[in-house]
Image: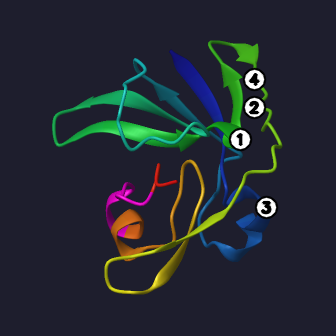
């Protein structure tokens, strides 16, 4: 897979003392990574010390030479309040939680609680 990705530094390129390219180019195979969110894609790098790279789908301009556009589905998600074991109240949706465990690991016991 070949990706052409917008450089997030491009809009502020005049702030740098070096030339900033408008796009980054990456090549690799898609990799399934458990903490990769639906709005991200992980691709292999070929470097054993840095096995994959996670890229925001909204920044991809082209995939395999074809224009790419990532459309976010706008859905109102139900937010539930759950009391944790320490007595603090957290906001929980089907895919996120405001507890420290979710912030650190990307998963927690509160998701799925009814």
Q: Determine contact: label 1, label 3, CB under 8 Å.
A: no
Q: Determine contact: label 2, label 4, CB under 8 Å.
A: yes
Which is the main secondary structure of the residues drawn in magenta? Answer: loop
Depth check: give the residue in front, 61 or 94.
Answer: 94
| Image location of residue 82, percent across then percent down | 51, 70
Q: CA distance from mark 2 to mark 4?
A: 7 Å
Q: How would you rate the neighbour count of disc 1 (Cα within 10 Å): few for under 14, some for 14-19, many for 20 or more?
A: some
Q: CA distance from mark 4 to mark 3?
A: 20 Å
Q: Nearer the viewer, mark 1 or mark 3?
A: 1
Q: Nearer the viewer, mark 4 or mark 3?
A: 4
Badge 3 marks a residue whose secondary structure is helix
Q: Which residue is mark 1?
A: 58
Residue interval drawn in magenta? 104-110
Say whether disc 1 or disc 4 marks the residue closer to the N-terminus. 1
Depth check: give the residue in front, 7 or 100.
Answer: 100
Q: Which mark is residue 11?
A: 3
Q: Which mark is residue 68?
A: 4
Res 58 quadrant in image: top right
């Amino acid at each position: 897979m070949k990706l052409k990705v917008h450089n997030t530094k491009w809009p502020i390129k005049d702030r740098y003392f070096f030339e900033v390219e408008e796009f980054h180019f990456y090549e690799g195979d898609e990799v399934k990574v458990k903490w990769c969110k639906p709005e991200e894609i992980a691709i292999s790098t070929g470097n054993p010390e840095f096995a994959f790279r996670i890229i925001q789908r909204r920044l991809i301009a082209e995939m395999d030479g074809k224009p790419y556009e990532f459309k976010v589905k706008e859905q109102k998600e139900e937010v539930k309040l759950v009391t944790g074991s320490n007595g603090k109240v957290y906001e929980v949706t089907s895919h996120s939680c405001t507890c420290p465990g979710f912030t650190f690991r990307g998963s927690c016991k509160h998701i799925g609680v009814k």
